[in-house]
Image (tube, grey):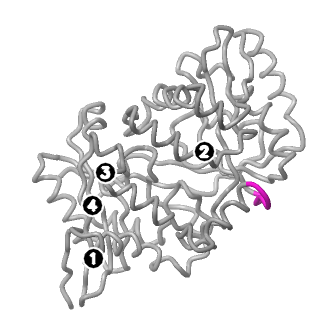
Amino acid sequence: MEPVTIKRVSSKQELKTFIRFNYEFYKDSPYSVPDLYDDMLGTFSPKKNAAFEFCEADYFLALKGGKVVGRVAAIINRRANERWNKKQVRFGWIDFIDDESVSRALIDTVMAWGRERGMTEIAGPLGFTDMDAEGMLIEGFDQLSTMATIYNYPYYPEHIERLGLEKAADWVEMKIYIPESIPEKHQRIANIISQKYGLRIRKIKSKYEALTSGITHKIFELINDAYEPLFGFSRMTQKQIDAYVKMYVPVLDLRMVTLVENDEGELVAVGISMPSLSKALQKAKGKLLPFGWWHLLKALFWKRPEALDLLLVAVRPDYQGKGVNALLFTDLIPIYKQLGFVYAESNPELEQNDKVQSQWQYFKTEQHKRRRCYRKDI
């Protein structure tokens, strides 16, 4: 049996190979959604990814018989480790052929890399931060992935579990079917909580307002506050927020962005959604040029798919559990119907996050995917 060789990525060409391995490996899968190559270059670049202010990373290729057969990123997020009092090395962007010598070599490499830096635990798949895709798919292998999630073959979790890693956390994903009209109970709750707490809907009227009024930065600060207690989260820095504002504002349909403010004009909740880009990204094959941009623009603005992605729903901690989400969706449901959407993809929600799960109780839903973060002491 040929041995597995591990090579640390140390050149632009090797980084290109690292990124492209996933595209080639899944090119025949009807369910995998490729990332945009330029986005991945930015993610892995210390000069472009603001997370490198508090993260350290290396990328590794597995070779067998001179052929690339796997890849993995080793990451230390110092802010998350400080927040959760851990000495944790993360593995992310892991792919491998169905050969345990390959998966073992990749995980062993990350564990050794982490131990050299004083880490005592390995966990993953995780990215640099929660804004990266995380969690290995363990159910729903016959479902179309989303641009915000990982797709992997069914044998991946079998390998990881044979290597001695155990469940650290699970996320579930839901299809939420758009009702013909706002559910009566939902509307009643929205009316009650808007009066009780003095809440009102705010819409952003233009990209100019989004970029110049400071509201988008307030949205990301709200996300920091709302998500801080969640598994593995580390607060976004100002530099990260600036980058996300620049990335997302140009492609958002502002009709699909809803804010909730209180009587003092403070932002207390936000819901951001967009047309699903899954099929458009498949057609683009990870490239904007020469024609990838056309498929994406068509899905965003002209010929929308039947699915939309709920990119995020965030409620300020002191307003959580009070039904504020009902106010968001009484605004958004008519817009979804007007734009022709059939269902929404929730994207990953922590299975124990009852506050998030309960917001779908008045809708027809289908839990169609589950993904897992694994861990092991090293």
Residue 28 x/y as whole percent:
55, 81
Q: Nearer the viewer, residue 318 or 368?
A: 318
Label 3, label 4: how far apart the Cα atoms are: 35 Å
Q: Is residue 242 left or right of residue 355?
A: left
Point out the frontmost of discs 2 and 1. 2
Specify which label sits upstream in the sequence, 3 or 2: 3
From the image, tell me which residue sits under label 2. Answer: 311
Instruction: Read off the magenta span.
Output: 301-306
Above or below: residue 249 compared with residue 153: above
- Distance between mark 2 and mark 1 Cα atoms: 34 Å
Q: CA distance from mark 3 to mark 2?
A: 26 Å
Seen from this angle, which residue lies furthest right?
180
To which residue does mark 3 refer? 47
Work out whether mark 2 precedes mark 1 in sequence or the reverse, and give the earlier one: 1
| Circle nearer the N terminus (3, 1) | 3
The answer to whether any part of residue 239 appears in the image is yes
Task: Give the residue drawn at x 58%, y 57%.
Answer: 369
Tell me the SS state at disc 1: helix
